[in-house]
Image (spheres, helix red, strand yellow):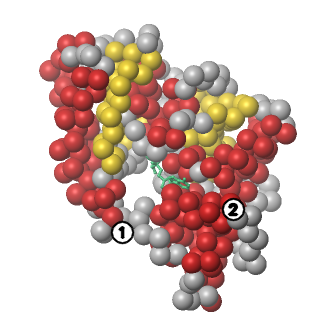
């Protein structure tokens, strides 16, 4: 079964073709980062308009790269939420119109289910059940995943998401937008020098006894540090970035290991934009190895938003269940709880 997938929940237009027999055939992505950079963040209306410009050219590229035509498509998957309403509406309306015109089934995909299943696109994919750490710009959750649509929330952030904390801290350090990867790069440069810093940040909720997170206090602590050390030298900036990354990656690692212990599982997957962080990967690799557990990640480009994870999640649902009363109307779910999903 050949499934065309659309992702347009935020500032990336992603399109991909996934074949349930042959795997991922092609994928293409357009990032709007440059367009939003001058505003210091995503401008929703500009995002929607740009998705309109990119979606069909990307679809043509993907079909051409996979040597397929529209007639070969058996089903269409699209991100219905959560995300920016206008941006979601673009992908949803294009996907539903195309499905209607081609007379093929379509499936609405939850963006976070896409992230959760992204490691399954790799060779030697992890087997269910597993613990999933989902760390993106909007979410920081630990989940017990027993199968497609079988998700139990183990822990959540009480305030900022991990990626949001990276972005806000980067802004405080004057690193621009999007700050997460820039902050990580600066921190890693410090780490390469094996530098020790006298800056010390708290590890909020490290010993809270549950699997929840809280990152907003860290950002406030960084703000105090910045105010006390202004104007920042490059060295101080790198020191703070390094200590911030140490704090976040330590908290995430400790909570992942607690989640494995509490569930009795020995299999961890990590997904979402912060899953691309190399310090986090180093720490998780070491911690899981010590406890004889496995850890899997998506390839770097599938940690952040992409069409491949949506085509894949949609294909996993469509191959099990095709809605007999196919509905081609369209609506989006800017807010959508992952726990509402059920087995296909
Ligand atoms: O999953 P994603 O592309 O979008 C959401 O669904 O939110 O994640 C984007 C987030 C941003 O907050 C970005 O700063 C963060 O992931 N991020 C990183 C890294 N790469 C992306 N954070 C830390 N280290 C990185 N290498
Ligand atoms: Zn995402």
Which residue position is annotated with label 2? Answer: 191
Where on the picture, by quarter, is residue 123? top right
* Residue located beneath label 1 in the image: 40
Upstream in the sequence, badge 2 or badge 1? 1
Left or right: 206 in relation to 46: right
Of residue 35 and residue 203, the one placed in the foreground of this image is: 35
Q: Is residue 14 left or right of residue 297?
A: left
Query: Is 201 placed left or right of 180 in the picture?
Result: right
Cα distance in 3D space between marks 2 and 1: 27 Å
Q: Which of marks 2 and 1 is in front?
A: 2
Q: Which residue lies furthest to the left in this view?
A: 101
Residue visible at 80% across and 55% down in the picture: 209
Residue 130 is situated, as x and y percent measured from the top left of the image, at 67, 30
| Residue 92: image location, x then y, percent | 26, 36
- Can residue 288 be seen by looking at this rendering? yes
* Residue 194 against residue 91 in the figure, above or below: below
**Image height of 15 relative to 166, above or below:** above
Vertical order, 121 against 54 (above or below)? above
**Where is the N terminus found, in terms of image quarters?**
top left
């Amino acid at each position: 079964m050949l499934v065309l997938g659309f992702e347009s929940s935020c500032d990336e237009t992603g399109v991909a073709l996934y074949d349930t027999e042959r795997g991922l055939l092609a994928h293409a992505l357009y990032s709007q980062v440059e367009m939003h950079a001058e505003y210091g963040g995503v401008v929703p209306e500009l995002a929607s308009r740009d998705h309109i410009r990119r979606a069909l050219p990307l679809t043509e590229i993907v079909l051409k790269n996979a040597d397929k035509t529209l007639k070969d498509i058996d089903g269409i998957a699209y991100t219905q939420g959560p995300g920016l309403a206008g941006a979601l509406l673009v992908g949803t309306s294009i996907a539903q119109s195309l499905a209607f015109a081609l007379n093929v089934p379509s499936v609405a995909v939850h963006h976070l289910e896409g992230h959760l299943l992204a490691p399954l696109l790799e060779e030697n994919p992890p087997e269910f059940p597993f613990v999933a750490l989902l760390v993106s710009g909007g979410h920081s959750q630990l989940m017990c995943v027993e199968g497609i649509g079988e998700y139990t929330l183990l822990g959540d952030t009480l305030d900022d998401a991990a990626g949001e904390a990276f972005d806000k801290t980067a802004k405080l350090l004057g690193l621009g937008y999007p700050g997460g990867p820039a902050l990580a790069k600066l921190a890693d440069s410090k780490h390469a020098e094996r530098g020790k810093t006298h800056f010390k940040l708290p590890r909020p909720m490290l010993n809270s006894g549950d699997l929840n997170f809280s990152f907003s206090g860290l950002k406030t602590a960084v703000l105090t540090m910045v105010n006390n050390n202004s104007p920042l030298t490059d060295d101080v900036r790198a020191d703070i970035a390094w200590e911030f990354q140490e704090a976040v990656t330590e908290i995430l690692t400790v909570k992942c290991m607690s989640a494995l212990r509490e569930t009795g599982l020995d299999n961890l997957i990590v997904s979402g934009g912060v899953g691309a962080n190399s310090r986090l990967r180093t720490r998780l690799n070491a911690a899981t190895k010590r406890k004889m557990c496995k850890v899997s990640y998506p390839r770097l480009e599938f940690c952040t938003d992409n069409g491949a994870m949506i085509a894949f999640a949609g294909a996993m649902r469509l191959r099990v269940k095709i809605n007999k009363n196919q509905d081609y109307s369209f609506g989006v779910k800017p807010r959508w709880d992952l726990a509402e999903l059920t087995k296909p």
